[in-house]
């Protein structure tokens, strides 16, 4: 796929086939995440890949939301990728903790690479962190940042409607709308 095709085809998938993840595809997705930029090139994050059905059930029970779709997706997908980070291995500037940024960039690289490999994903960030930490034996100095189920999609939901750039992008100053026809 071309880069912009990957961007356009990535959606939040919540229904998966049971087909196992191809090892070479997984390696390419993980290697893509490892190439992401981070605070002073310190890699504060680690990935945990879970394919054990019992562990996935436990992870699904940690999700906090008002529907069961994300929990069901975690149970159904052949694999779940969890990103965990050590805040001490990253920086803080003006009260911004960069381990969160580093982790988000790495997870997005992983998600886009998985999309390119033909897999669906769904970023999940609402969960009981302590319960996940206990379930996966994660040390207390590590923060659980996000997780995503990974697998062949049984559905490809359409993207939400494209956001109006005039409402979300400014040029030079707040409130001065950028347009795609900017020259």
Image (cartoon, rainbow, N blue to C red):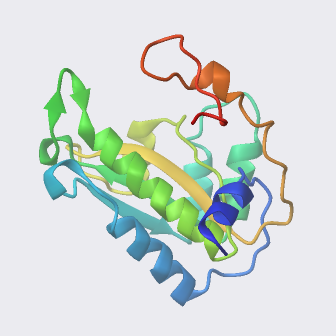
The C terminus sits in image quarter: top right
Residue 169 falls left or right of residue 72 = left
The N terminus sits in image quarter: bottom right
Residue 116 falls left or right of residue 11 = left
Q: Residue at x 79, y 46 (%)?
A: 159
**Residue 134 appears in the picture as rendered:** no
Residue 47 falls left or right of residue 111 = left
Q: Quick one: 51 or 110, which is closer to the camera?
A: 110
Looking at the image, is 156 positioned above or below residue 35? above
Looking at the image, is 98 positioned above or below residue 12? above
> Looking at the picture, how far across and down is residue 113, in whole percent?
54, 69
Q: Quick one: 181 or 73, which is closer to the camera?
A: 181
> Looking at the picture, how far across and down is residue 23, in whole percent?
54, 87
> Looking at the picture, how far across and down is residue 42, in whole percent?
16, 56
Q: Residue at x 38, y 62 (%)?
A: 47
Residue 156 falls left or right of residue 83 = right
Q: Quick one: 138 or 109, which is closer to the camera?
A: 109
> Looking at the picture, how far across and down is residue 116, in whole percent?
63, 72
Q: Residue furthest front?
A: 183
Q: Residue at x 64, y 57 (%)?
A: 7
**Residue 147 appears in the picture as rendered:** yes
Count of numbered labels shown in the rendering: 0
């Amino acid at each position: 796929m071309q880069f912009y095709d990957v961007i356009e085809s990535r959606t939040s998938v919540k229904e998966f086939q049971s087909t196992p993840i191809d090892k070479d595809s997984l390696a390419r997705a993980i290697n893509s995440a490892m190439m992401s930029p981070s605070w002073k090139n310190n890699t504060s994050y680690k990935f945990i890949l879970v394919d054990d059905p019992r562990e996935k059930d436990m992870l699904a029970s940690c999700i906090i939301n008002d529907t069961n779709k994300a929990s069901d997706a975690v149970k159904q997908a052949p694999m779940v990728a969890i990103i965990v980070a050590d805040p001490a291995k990253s920086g803080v500037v003006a009260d911004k903790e960069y381990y969160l940024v580093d982790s988000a960039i790495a997870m997005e690289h992983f998600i886009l690479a998985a999309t390119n490999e033909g897999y669906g994903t769904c970023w999940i960030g609402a969960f009981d962190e302590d319960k996940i930490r206990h379930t996966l034996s994660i040390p207390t100095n590590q923060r659980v940042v996000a997780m995503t189920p990974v697998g062949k999609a049984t559905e490809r939901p359409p993207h939400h409607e494209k956001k109006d750039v005039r409402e979300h992008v400014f040029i030079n100053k707040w409130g001065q709308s950028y347009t795609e026809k900017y020259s």
